[in-house]
Image: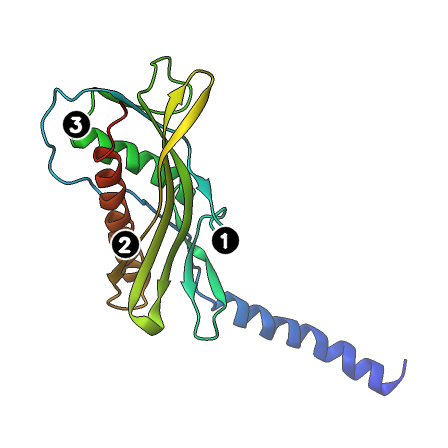
């Protein structure tokens, strides 16, 4: 065995031991799952009329994953790995929209897909945007919503809007990103509720 090979074999265990020490010092970072459920405003009572069916909202580009989205300075996006929404954003937005509509007390019932109740209005759409924009110090949310009336075996569109809202972003920590995006989504949900309440299905 050559001297160089013997020297390499002697040093290899020491090098690997050193790497093990470095890896052992790396802190463990656990994933955090954040709920996306802005609470609705105080209820408006009960006794409303009509049934509203909220169909599952579609997810816009980049929103099919659960990672928190941050808009970077170069215009690209960063999708969080360690900080995620507890449920997919479009699914959470669908549930929140139903809760907000029900909380108004303006409708006899607010139901989802597959309900046996015959709806007076059908609400469907796409969650287009939900992200933090640190350069602008805001979070942004956007929702395209279509409200239609069932007619026979089809639907007659009554309104279509793209709703947008922003909320102040206090910092870049995970709690800051979550709080601002929840607030932006709440702004969009408020507009959605106003849109649906303002439509006469007759």
Crowd tier of the residue under label 1, counting other residues whose Cα lies within 10 Å: few below 14, some 14–19, many 20 or above: some
N-terminal of the pair, mark 2 or mark 1, is 1
Whole-Å distance between the Cαs marked 2 and 3? 24 Å
The kind of secondary structure element at disc 1 is loop
Please identify the residue farthest to the top as the structure is shown.
116
Q: Residue at x 21, y 29 (%)?
A: 102
Residue beneath the point at 41% across and 63% down: 70
Tell me if label 2 and label 3 are in contact, CB under 8 Å. Answer: no
Q: Quadrant of residue 198?
A: top left
Q: Which quadrant: the N terminus?
A: bottom right
For the C terminus, give its image quadrant.
Answer: top left
Per the image, the residue denoted by label 3 is 106
Q: Is residue 38 visible?
A: no
**Disc marking residue 184:** 2
**Label placed on residue 54:** none
Q: Residue at x 29, y 49 (%)?
A: 185
Residue 101 position by quadrant = top left
| Residue 68 as seen in the image, left or right of residue 48 | right
Name the element at disc 3. loop
Please tell me how crowded label 3 is: few (under 14), some (14-19), or many (20+) other residues with Cα within 10 Å: many
Q: Is residue 164 above or below residue 35?
A: below
Q: CA distance from mark 2 to mark 1?
A: 17 Å
Q: Is residue 103 left or right of residue 10?
A: left
- The answer to whether residue 167 of the structure is visible from this angle is yes
- Quarter residue 97 falls in: top left
Q: Which residue is mark 1?
A: 62
């Amino acid at each position: 065995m050559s001297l160089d090979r013997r020297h390499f074999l002697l040093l290899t265990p020491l090098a690997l031991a050193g790497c093990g020490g470095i890896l052992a010092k790396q802190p463990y970072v656990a994933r955090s799952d954040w709920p996306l459920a802005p609470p609705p405003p105080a209820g408006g009572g009960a006794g409303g009329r009509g049934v509203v069916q909220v169909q599952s909202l579609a997810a816009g580009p980049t929103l099919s994953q659960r990672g928190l989205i941050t808009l970077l300075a170069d215009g690209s996006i960063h999708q969080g790995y360690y900080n995620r929404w507890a449920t997919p954003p479009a699914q959470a937005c669908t549930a929140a929209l139903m809760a907000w509509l029900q909380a108004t007390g303006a409708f006899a019932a607010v139901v989802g897909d597959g309900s046996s109740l015959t709806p007076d209005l059908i609400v469907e759409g796409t969650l287009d945007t939900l992200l933090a924009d640190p350069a602008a110090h805001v979070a942004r949310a956007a929702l395209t919503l279509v409200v239609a009336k069932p007619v026979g075996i089809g639907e007659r569109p009554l309104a279509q809007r793209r709703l947008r809202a922003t909320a102040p972003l206090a910092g870049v920590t995970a709690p800051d990103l979550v709080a601002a995006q929840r607030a932006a989504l709440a702004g969009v949900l408020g507009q959605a509720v106003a849109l649906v309440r303002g439509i006469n299905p007759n």
